[in-house]
Image: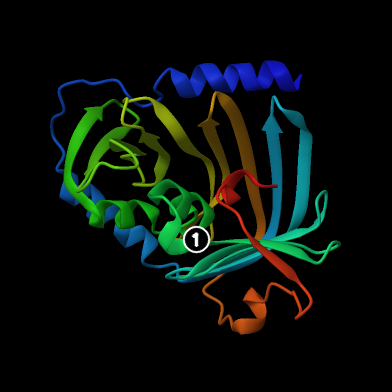
C-alpha cells in the first residue's frame, strides 16, 4: 500500500503539478498577492492539536500525534507524544529536533538552511509563506489561469537553491492551494498542497490539512499534517515554545534536519 501510494506521489510531483503554461489574462500579480496578504494578516498566532503521517518508500508508515503552537513572524513548535516522541522547534536563529525519550537533539542554524528548508520547517508553511516568498523575489508574474486556479510564478533574485516557485491560488476565496519549488534543472522537488481550510470566523481561514512532498536523491517522501481544535490569535509566551531539553542534552549539528525523523 505504501509503495503504490509513493509511486502515485512520485508521478504527481515529477509531472510538474501546476506547471502548465497558458496565456494569462484578467489578473494582476501584485493584486493577487495583496488579496492573499489581507487574508493572512488577520491571523497572528495559532495553537491546537496536530497529526502528521509520513510516507516513504524507504521506511514504514509513521504516524505522530501531539500539539502545535505558531506565532508570527517566526516562532513555531510541534510536540509529538505518540509515534516518535519528539519536538520540532523553529525560531529566527535555529531549527531544533529533540527526541524526548533519548534526551538527544539535533539542530541547524537558520542561516545555513536553504529557502525551501526554511519554508517547510518554519511557520511560513502555515501562514504568511506566499508573501515572504514574494518579498525575496526578483520578479513575479501570472503564469497560468484556469477556472479554479490562478498560478503565480516567482523568480528569485539569486537562483542558487531553486530556479522558480509556482503558487496556486483559488480566485473564489484567495486561499493558496499549492506552493511548488523547482530546482535549477526546472524539476519539481518540493511541493505543499493545501487541501483543506477551516473557517474560524468571517473571512478568517487557517489550513486544516497540508501534504508536503519532497524528492531527495530520487527518494520521495510525503508528510500529511492535519491540524484540529485550532485556536487563533491567542497570547502565547516562552513556555508555549519551550522544547523541554535540559543541560545534559547532547545537541549535534544536522545538515538534513528536514528529513531527519
Q: How many marks?
A: 1
| Residue of label 1 | 123
State left or right for residue 56 relative to residue 11. Answer: right
- Above or below, 154 against 113 in this view is above
Q: How is the image coloured?
A: rainbow
Q: Nearer the viewer, residue 260 or 248?
A: 248
Q: Residue at x 59, y 84 (%)?
A: 237
Residue 161, picture quadrant: top left
Q: Is residue 80 visible?
A: no
Circle 1 Cα neighbour tier, 10 Å, few/some/many (<14 / 14–19 / ≥20): many
Q: Is residue 254 visible?
A: yes
Q: Residue at x 70, y 47 (%)?
A: 261
Q: Residue at x 39, y 22 (%)?
A: 16
Residue 218, picture quadrant: top right
Q: Residue at x 21, y 31 (%)?
A: 143
Q: Nearer the viewer, residue 123 or 86?
A: 86
Residue 177: percent from left, percent from top:
43, 39
Q: Classify the position of the N terminus by image quarter.
A: top right
Residue 197: percent from left, percent from top:
52, 48
State left or right for residue 31 relative to residue 199. Answer: left
Residue 152: percent from left, percent from top:
26, 38
Local secondary structure at mark 1: helix
- Above or below, 155 against 253 in this view is above
- Above or below, 164 against 68 in this view is above
Amino acid at each position: 500500500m505504501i509503495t503504490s501510494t509513493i509511486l502515485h506521489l512520485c508521478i504527481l510531483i515529477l509531472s510538474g503539478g501546476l506547471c502548465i503554461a497558458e496565456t494569462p489574462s484578467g489578473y494582476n500579480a501584485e493584486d493577487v498577492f495583496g488579496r492573499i496578504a489581507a487574508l493572512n494578516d488577520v491571523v497572528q498566532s495559532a495553537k491546537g492539536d496536530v497529526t502528521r503521517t509520513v510516507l516513504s518508500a524507504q521506511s514504514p508508515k509513521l504516524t505522530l500525534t501531539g500539539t502545535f503552537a505558531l506565532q508570527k513572524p517566526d516562532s513555531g513548535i510541534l510536540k509529538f507524544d505518540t509515534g516518535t516522541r519528539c519536538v520540532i522547534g523553529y525560531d529566527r536563529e535555529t531549527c531544533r529536533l529533540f527526541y524526548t525519550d533519548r534526551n538527544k537533539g539535533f539542530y541547524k542554524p537558520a542561516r545555513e538552511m536553504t529557502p525551501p528548508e526554511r519554508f517547510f520547517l518554519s511557520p511560513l508553511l502555515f501562514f504568511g509563506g506566499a508573501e515572504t516568498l514574494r518579498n525575496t523575489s526578483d520578479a513575479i508574474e501570472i503564469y497560468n489561469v484556469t477556472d479554479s486556479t490562478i498560478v503565480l510564478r516567482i523568480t528569485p533574485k539569486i537562483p542558487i537553491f531553486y530556479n522558480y516557485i509556482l503558487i496556486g491560488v483559488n480566485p473564489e476565496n484567495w486561499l493558496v492551494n499549492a506552493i511548488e519549488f523547482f530546482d535549477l534543472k526546472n524539476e519539481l522537488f518540493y511541493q505543499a498542497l493545501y487541501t483543506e481550510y477551516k473557517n474560524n470566523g468571517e473571512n478568517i481561514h487557517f489550513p486544516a490539512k497540508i501534504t508536503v512532498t519532497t524528492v531527495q536523491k530520487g527518494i520521495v517522501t510525503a508528510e500529511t499534517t492535519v491540524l484540529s481544535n485550532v485556536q487563533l490569535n491567542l497570547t502565547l509566551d516562552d513556555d508555549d515554545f519551550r522544547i523541554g531539553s535540559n543541560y545534559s542534552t547532547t545537541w549535534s549539528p544536522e545538515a538534513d534536519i528536514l528529513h531527519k525523523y
